[in-house]
Amino acid sequence: MRLPRPLGISGPSLWLPAGRQSVAEAVAAGLLDQDTADELGLQGLPVAELAPPEMAVEAGRSALRAAGLDARAVGLVLHAWIHYQGHDLWSPAHFIADRLGAEDAVPVGVQQVCNGGAAAVELAAARLFVEPGLGHALVTTADAFADPGFDRWSGDYGIAYGDGATALVLHHLPDGANGRSADLVLHSLSTVAVPRLERMHRGDDPFSPAARSLGPRVDIRRTKKAYLRAEGLEAFTGASARALRTAVESCLADAGLRATGDTPLRYVVAPRLGRKTVDLAYAPLLTKLTGAELLRPGADTGHLGAGDTAATLADLRTHGTLATGEYALIVSAGAGFTWSCLLVSGA
């Protein structure tokens, strides 16, 4: 997505609960074996007591406070998630907007599974350009992967799921402003989808009348096994590599950069997946395409559902990772499958 001009990202925030379960505790409890723990490469996972929308409100408050913005200046609230939000037929985005005091905002829920956070940023960017009077867009994500419905440690291959929420404010940069007008600058976005891979998360399961009708827990391993039996691993890895390459090259090209070792990127940032998954599916291609230093966030959070992208943006702000004019390419992926890239720089 070629932006007519860069946008500002202010107050990107990551809200994590105080509760945690270490890898050692999980292994001792029989929730995963030591070999799997080593492949994940995690220290532990955050474990929440709050419902996801309540966590999103906390993250939203942090983002608005860090951005120095009154909630009444928000014209759009986009909320993304992948797992149950606490009620059966209900809009968490409206709850978040109401609790934050964004009384003039239009709340919208975004369902693109783990790529939902990146998709929400892309939708917000498009809306800002077609509706100049919109003001500011607030993007939130939140997920909790609690028993009995979800096995956060062993319900998937190569991924462990942590609870938490994120938020950021997306807005136009003022013309001719002096001083710091944003925490980060968004230069371009790209999204590539391969819809034929949707079976990875459907498998051979029949359509059912209600959630978890086929079993008491979300079982991603079952559906992936069924896909691999029918299609083979190479069908997925080949399509994934092609889509990832296209997403990277398109994002850089839309910002006037090239996907070569000469690209002026300081960092390229992988999704918050297990260490072995990143090593196999992301690290070789991203390093070859960009020549940038690969960052592997998430050792202390695990995969945050729809929140990986915003969590990385929050890390960049909190740690002051990017100096003014330095670039980072943030990679996101989600079931379906969809891959997104965001190119940002220090403000």
Image (tube, rainbow, N blue to C red):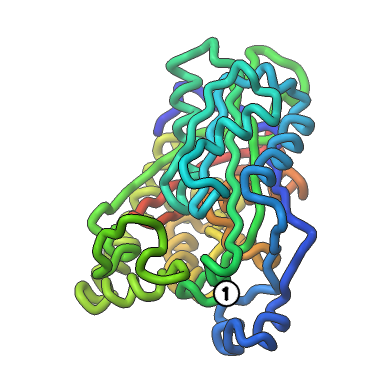
Instruction: Please identify the quadrant where the N terminus is shown.
Output: top left
Task: Locate residue 223, reporting x and y percent.
Answer: 33, 70
Residue at (46, 35) in percent of width and height: 122
Q: Is residue 288 left or right of residue 202?
A: right
Q: Residues within 10 Å of mark 1 (few under 14, many from 20)?
A: many
- Residue 293 in view here: no
Q: Is residue 41 left or right of residue 320?
A: left
- Residue 305 in view here: yes
Residue on which disc 1 sits:
153
Residue at (71, 83) in percent of width and height: 24
Query: Compared with residue 177, is residue 200 higher up or lower down, i.e. above or below?
Result: below
Residue at (61, 89) in percent of width and height: 34
Residue at (61, 30) in percent of width and height: 138
- Total numbered circles: 1
Task: Locate residue 267, reporting x and y percent.
Answer: 59, 53
248 or 89: nearer the eye?
89
**SS category of the residue bearing label 1:** loop
Outermost residue, left direction?
Answer: 230
Query: Compared with residue 96, is residue 338 higher up or lower down, i.e. above or below?
Result: below
Question: The residue under label 1 is which amino acid type?
Answer: Trp
Q: Is residue 21 left or right of residue 148?
A: right
Task: Locate residue 250, reporting x and y percent.
Answer: 37, 43
Q: Is residue 238 left or right of residue 151?
A: left
Toward which corner of the image does residue 334 lie, by quadrant?
bottom left
177 or 161: nearer the eye?
161
